[in-house]
Image (cartoon, helix red, strand yellow):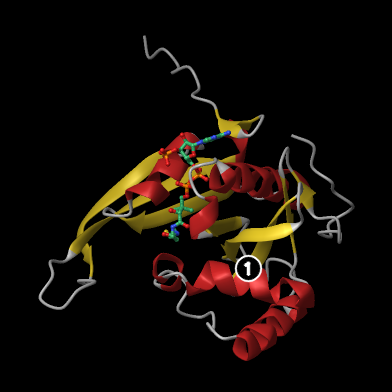
Amino acid sequence: MNDIRQGHELTPEGIETRRLRIRRFLPSDIDDLLAVVSHPSVAAETPNIPHDSEGLAEYVDQQNRLALFEPHACVDFAIERKSDQRVIGLVTVVSNGNRQGEIGWGIGIDYRSHGFATEAAQGLISYLFDAHNYHRIFAGTIYTNTASWAVMERLGMRKEAHFIKAHPPTMPEGPWIDTVRYAVLAEDWVDGRRIEKQGVPTS
Ligand SMILES: CC(C)(COP(=O)(O)OP(=O)(O)OC[C@H]1O[C@@H](n2cnc3c(N)ncnc32)[C@H](O)[C@@H]1OP(=O)(O)O)[C@@H](O)C(=O)NCCC(=O)NCCS
C-alpha cells in the first residue's frame, strides 16, 4: 500500500491504495455519489445523506467545510477507483476526540465483491494510525449485515462484543436484532492488518 500523506492534511490526492483513492468530495462527484447512496442498502445506512442531486450537492459542500475528522461529526470521504476516477463508494469516520474513531463503509451495488470496501478501510485505518496518531478504531453493524462484518473480519479487526437484541426491528413486526462491535488498536496494526500478538506466559 502506498499512502500519500502530507503533514496532517488529507491532500487533494487523498489516501492512495493499490486500486483506490480516498479523498474529500468534489462537486463533479454528485452523479456517481447519487448512484451509490440511492441504493436502498446504502440509503438505509446513511439516513443523514440526501438522495437527490440538489440535496447531495449541498451535503457535499457541508462535508467539505467540516474539519478533517471533526470530533462527533459524521465525516464522509469519497472512494475513487483510480482506473477510471469513478466514485464507487464512501467511507465514514466519526471521531470521539480521544484518539478513537468509528468507521463505516458503503460501496455502490455495481462495485461489490471486489474487495474495495476492505481495501478502502485498510487505507483509512493506516492513515488514521500513522498520520493522526489514533489509538483505537472501531466499527459495528447489525448481525444480519453479514457483508459488513465480513469486512471487519477481513481487516482482522478483533470482535469485542455481540449485543443481544440491541437494534430495533428494521421491518414492521420484525424482531429486535443483535449487533456486533469490532475494533483494532494502533499497536496491533501492521501492514494494513491486525496482527495477533503472542500471549505472555503466565508461569
Ligand atoms: C458492506 C459492504 C460495503 C461490503 O461490500 P463488499 O463488496 O462485500 O466488501 P469488499 O469490498 O470487502 O469485498 C469482499 C468480497 O470481494 C471479494 N474479493 C475480490 N477481490 C478481493 C480482494 N482483492 N480483496 C478482498 N476481497 C476481494 C471477496 O472474496 C468478497 O467476496 P464475497 O462478496 O463473495 O464474499 C456492502 O455490502 C455495502 O455497501 N452494503 C450497504 C451499506 C452497508 O451496509 N454498510 C455497512 C454499514 S454498518
Which residue lies at the image location 77% right of the left edge and 74% below the top edge? 28
Residue 115: % across, % down: 55, 40
Q: Quadrant of residue 90?
A: bottom right
Left or right of 172, for residue 38: right
Left or right of 110, for residue 57: right
Residue 11: % across, % down: 86, 59
Q: Which residue is mark 1?
A: 76
Residue 203 against residue 140 in the figure, above or below: above
- Furthest-right residue in view? 6
Q: Nearer the viewer, residue 173 or 93?
A: 173
Q: Nearer the viewer, residue 130 or 90?
A: 90
Q: Quadrant of the C terminus?
A: top left
Which residue lies at the image location 49% right of the left edge and 74% below the top edge? 38
Which residue lies at the image location 38% right of the left edge and 14% below the top edge? 202
Q: Nearer the viewer, residue 15 or 137?
A: 15
Mark yes or no: residue 194 visible: yes
Q: Quadrant of the N terminus?
A: top right
Left or right of 75, for residue 24: right
- Furthest-left residue in view? 173
Residue 112: % across, % down: 50, 49
Residue 195 against residue 11 in the figure, above or below: above
Residue 91: % across, % down: 59, 59
